Image (cartoon, rainbow, N blue to C red):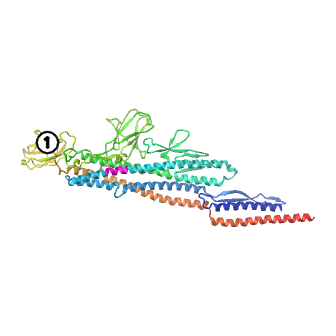
Amino acid sequence: MADILKIGLSALLSHQRALAATSNNIANANTPGYSRQRVELAERSSERLGSSFVGTGVDVEFVRRITDDILAGQLRNAATEFHRSDVFSELASVLDNLLADQQTGLSPTLQSFVNAMQQVADDPGSQSSRQVFLSEARNLASRFNSLSGRLDEVSAELNARIRASVTEINSLGAGIADLNRQILASGTPSDGAPPPELLDQRDRLLESLSQLIGVDTVEQSDGTVGVFIGTGQVLVLGTESASLAVRPGSFDPEQPNIVLEGAGPDVNVTEFLSGGSLGGGLDFRRELLTSARANIGMIALGLAQAFNTEHANGMDLLGNLGGDLFAVPAPRALAAATNAGSSSVTVSVTDLGALQPNDYQLVFDGSGYSLFRGNTGTAVAMTGSGTAVDPFLAEGISIVVAGAPATGDQFLLRTVSEVSSGLSVLFSDPARIAAAAPTRTRGALANVGNGAVSAGQIIDVTDPGLLATATIEFVDATTYSVNGAGSFAYTPGADIDINGTRIQITGSPAAGDQFVIEANAGGIGDNRNALAIAASLAAGIFNAGVTTLQGAASNLVTEVGAATAESQNRRDAQRLLFDQAEQKLESVRGVNLDEEAADLVRLEQLYQAAAQTVAVADSLFSTLLSALGRQ
């Protein structure tokens, strides 16, 4: 009877524990991250009774936390990829909308400016056409400034996100380390499974962390979990957690770096971090934002240089040679805060056709300088020695170094990325638009031959005699002099260069015929330079003369649009994978109320049966006592 009672009590207590676990599952059915629990029962050791063995009841072996570590890892990986794609897509869409707007985007504004220049060429004497052109010029410069400012805003928003993510990563890392500490305090794995609520909480923190940054986890033999980021940098190890911090960039405080703080010097881990919302933001900055800023700056520089170069070859309505219409910021070389040497660097753009939309890093390794692209780190070949007489030349830029560098010194060369922010229009007087050529040609009225002279082309606007009158007089049909001096052989249609002007004479001039090159003062109706400016704006400027201004703008819009569409497709695909991974894990660890209700009924019946066993034992024992009492 004692055995029956002991067996019944073991069943009663075991099924009571199972009922409690089932009730706890039902209570936490809507608790995020909860892993359902199941009581695992084990048969007690049997006892010998005569020549056989008789069972002694049941025990609760342990409470199993139902989960799947492999599926949990897959969920973390899917969360990392989805949140990376989601943030990248969101930021890329902002940039795409900014550049592709049909009204205020870069391409339509640039086209309006070119059209206004063509109107001046069509009617160079029209004050209204000139005024409209200046208005479009100011609008274009303002648009470049606005684009730069908007990119600054996007960059500032991104920096704020980075700081917020780093703060949250540190908090989650500290939370995981604290849970590791509590798990250790609850006993070693040999003492039994750790409290399931601690493991659930740790899994939830790991899931939240994986949404912010890609992580690798390693479970230790003592039940703790190690968390690693980047290329193996330790975030959590045992009960200790490292801290990330946002530090001003080595070259630019507005381009912060993420460092891993520890007992030794801080380690810059920015380039190693990937995945999650933080990785998505960093990837956007590396792959799109920096590139877009450089491309916009290169287009602004190409526009300004092409226009200013041709405009300088003309004459305005006031009789002055054309000056620069656009002011352009000069490229800058920013020294790293860690530089120990006394070197300095000067950089300039020398060839638009070879120029690339990049900033660069110039690094001194102790024996010489090396150049790398700022966005990819790709090495760039240089020629020259870096002196003023023989500068380094690479991809359309010239670099002059001076002073004594120290090993490890480096410079950030901002060749084009700051141009759009500082582009401006230098004058507002419509009369200063140099639509006319500074010189004109004419044949003398007394000429008797059938020679004809071209309108003339400016080949050297800096020639001191450019506006001086030059008279070409034919000595005979095959020889001419200039201003009464010299004897030059005449070849019909050949170039004749005088005082910075190039002309061609055709036909058969007679002896004594004269052709004059003179200043084009009062040339209100002359549109030769306006036509040259319009042609230069439509000509190939970049990529060895292949890509035009509009082509470069269209390429930028297309590139950003394609990257945005790709990121949106990737986000949608990763969302599907994330949902699938979440559903798989929830199918294992989630609470099914129908299943729990059935278990509740079954366990209740088992509990009642166990109670009946105890009641039978009690009845038998009472009967035995009564029988003994009668004796």
**Vertical comparison of 346 with 45: above or below:** above
Which residues are the magenta region? 140-148
- Residue 203 horizontal/vertical position (percent): 59, 54
Q: Residue at coordinates 39% horizontally, 34% vertically from top-left?
A: 343
Q: Residue furthest top?
A: 404
User: Quick one: quadrant of the N terminus?
Assistant: bottom right
The answer to which image quadrant residue 17 occupies is bottom right
The answer to which image quadrant residue 332 occupies is top left
**Nearer to me, 187 or 480:** 187
- Residue 354 horizontal/vertical position (percent): 33, 46
Whether residue 188 is in magenta: the answer is: no
Q: For the residue carrying disc 1, how many other residues have a C-alpha within 10 Å: few (<14), some (14-19), or many (20+)?
A: some
Q: Residue at coordinates 57% horizontally, 50% vertically from top-left?
A: 217
- Residue 205 horizontal/vertical position (percent): 58, 52
Whether residue 141 is in magenta: the answer is: yes
Give the overall secondary structure of the magenta segment.
helix
- Residue 158 horizontal/vertical position (percent): 45, 50
**Nearer to me, 294 or 569:** 294
Q: Residue furthest right?
A: 631
Q: Residue at coordinates 45% horizontally, 58% vertically from top-left?
A: 568
**Vertical comparison of 526 with 602: above or below:** above
Residue occupied by mark 1: 469
Identify residue type, mark 1: Thr
Q: Is residue 547 visible?
A: no
